[in-house]
Image: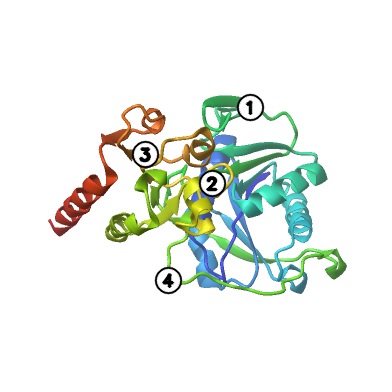
Amino acid sequence: MSVLVFTENWDGKFKKLSFELVSYATKVAEMLGTSATALSIGNVADDELSKLGNYGAKKIINIKSEALNILDSQAYTAAIAEITEKEGAKVIVIANNNMGKSIAPRLSVKLKAGVGSGVSKLPVSTDPFVVYKRAYSGNAFANVALKTDIKILTLMQNSFDLVETANEANIEAGSVSIDGSMVKTQVKDVQKQTGKLLLTDAEIVVAGGRGMKSADNWAPLEELADVLGAATACSRPVSDEGWRPHEEHTGQTGKIVAPNLYFAIGISGATQHLAGVSASKFIVAINSDKDAPIFEAAQYGIVGDAAKVLPKLVDAVKEAKAK
């Protein structure tokens, strides 16, 4: 019996998210008195795979298959399910991102497994198996008992600290019986965003709302993001107005993010927006309305005009970094 963790790769490279998943799975395995096995699908070099061992994986299974060259939820589900059965895994850990949200429900049906979706902490207990998660768009918390033989946990990004360990992992070539006809997904075109930090990867996000008043007022916000090495984001009204591109829209109807630090500048704090950012470790709000709902969700707040506050904040960050 082991804990199986599916580690997504991007063009043969792992990102922080993958290491976070392995760190989490390793701690869950320790609670269960077993070990963590990492599963990678795709062409990943051994030196890259070995990095997963630095975060606790005792065994790393790498599957290279023509049928899995295209990300197809049905085919990936079949592959993960087959490895789960071969390894006798009782807990499966997957990222709570677009891929994870697509695979977890299919895997649940195929393996008759209960799902703890969007967990952000280690299980409360293992017997019974109880997980902690946010509920009602982050306005409440719930302890959910998983009573099935196999459990699936989808982990919120940036919710678990990386834990490095000295470990020699055994890398194995895995094989699965996936029929190419199972793959229904077709890739027509690939367009990659370059030269810009992706929202889903960012540990710091600087977001602006309608309180910025105009698309012409975004320069100080972008400067703050630049000095912090942060990604830029916006609320839905801003993207609807065309002030910022739609891919920067965060919230319930946009991108769900969970950075370590989230700046909400000129954002009132509507429920729909908070639902997409409430998992952030720290929220800093800047708003001229002292009664704005965003201040209830923020750990730190500044009441003031963003146009006046931002330049001073940028100067303060520059000064701090110069020391």
Q: Residue 150 appears at what percent x and percent y?
A: 73, 39
Q: Which numbered mark, 2 or 1, is in the foreground of this view?
A: 2
For the question of whether residue 241 can be seen, the reply is yes
Q: How far apart are marks 1 and 3 (CA)?
A: 25 Å
Residue 256 image label: 2
Residue 144 image label: 1
The tag earlier along the polypeptide, 2 or 1, is: 1
Vertical arrangement, residue 7 with respect to residue 91, above or below: below
Foreground of the two, 145 or 280 = 280
User: In which quadrant will I find the C terminus?
Assistant: bottom left
- How packed mark 4 is, by other alpha carbons closer than 10 Å (few <14, some 14-19, many 20 or more), is few
Residue 282 image label: 3
- How packed mark 2 is, by other alpha carbons closer than 10 Å (few <14, some 14-19, many 20 or more), is many
Which amino acid type corresponds to the residue marked 4 in the rendered image?
A: Gly
Q: Residue 101 appears at what percent x and percent y?
A: 66, 48
Foreground of the two, 309 or 158 = 309
Are circles 4 and 2 on residues that touch, CB within 8 Å? no
- The quarter holding residue 33 reads top right
Q: How far apart are marks 4 and 2 (CA)?
A: 22 Å
- The quarter holding residue 265 reads top left
